[in-house]
């Protein structure tokens, strides 16, 4: 895997984040994927649960700005540093570290979000 594989996945993730379209969300993950919304929480397990939980916890389109850099790749794992700004009330910003494991088709088998709120 190369950085470009992970950039494409993040761009597709951003598309799904903005659309909340089930097809966009489902296309990101393998059937048996695990999505950790924080490092030590129980994951959302399987594509259908990920879709359901995503939609239950969705951000509305137009309330976020997101920038990122792929900072490293090791085998099938990519490491992405990002910044998310919520422009709704109250405005807030987060620094993100994402650890993404991709399969050969470019779908995530495991996705872990680490985030910290900015002051």
Image: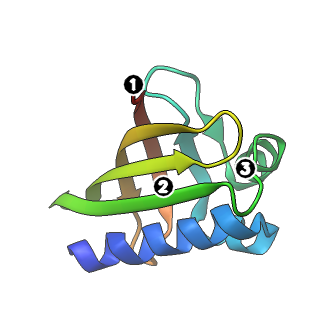
Spot occupied by residue 17 in the image (x, y as percentages of width and height): 65, 61
Crowdedness near tag 1: few (<14), some (14–19) or many (≥20) residues, C-alpha within 10 Å: few
Spot occupied by residue 30 in the image (x, y as percentages of width and height): 58, 62
Using the image as rendered, state which of residue 24 and residue 42 is in the foreground.
24
Report the residue marked by disc 2.
109
Mark 3 or 1, nearer chain start: 3
Using the image as rendered, state which of residue 104 and residue 83 is in the foreground.
83
Query: Quadrant location of the N terminus?
Result: bottom left
- Rendered residue at 61%/52% (across/down): 32
Mark 2 or 3, nearer chain start: 3
**Label for residue 59?**
3
Report the residue marked by disc 1.
119
Secondary structure of residue under mark 2: strand
Question: In the displayed structure, would residue 55 be above or below residue 91?
Answer: below
* Label 2 – label 3 distance at C-alpha: 23 Å
Crowdedness near tag 2: few (<14), some (14–19) or many (≥20) residues, C-alpha within 10 Å: many
* Label 1 – label 2 distance at C-alpha: 33 Å
- Rendered residue at 76%/40% (across/down): 57
Secondary structure of residue under mark 1: loop
**Residue 51 seen in the current view:** yes
Q: Is residue 32 left or right of residue 47?
A: left
**Residue 76 seen in the current view:** no
Using the image as rendered, state which of residue 59 and residue 23 is in the foreground.
59
Spot occupied by residue 68 in the image (x, y as percentages of width and height): 34, 61
Q: Is residue 48 left or right of residue 4?
A: right
Mark 1 or 2, nearer chain start: 2
Question: In the displayed structure, would residue 111 be above or below residue 68?
Answer: above
């Amino acid at each position: 895997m190369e950085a470009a594989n992970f950039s494409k996945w993040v761009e597709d993730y951003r598309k799904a984040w903005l659309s909340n379209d089930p097809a966009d969300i489902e296309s990101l993950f393998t059937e048996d994927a695990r999505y950790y919304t924080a490092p030590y929480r129980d994951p959302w397990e399987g594509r259908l649960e990920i879709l359901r939980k995503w939609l239950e916890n969705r951000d509305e389109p137009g309330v976020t700005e997101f920038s990122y850099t792929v900072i490293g790749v090791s085998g099938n794992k990519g490491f992405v540093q990002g910044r998310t700004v919520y422009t709704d009330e109250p405005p807030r910003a987060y620094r993100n570290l994402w650890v993404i494991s991709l399969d050969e088709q470019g779908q995530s088998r495991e996705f872990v979000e680490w985030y910290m709120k900015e002051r």
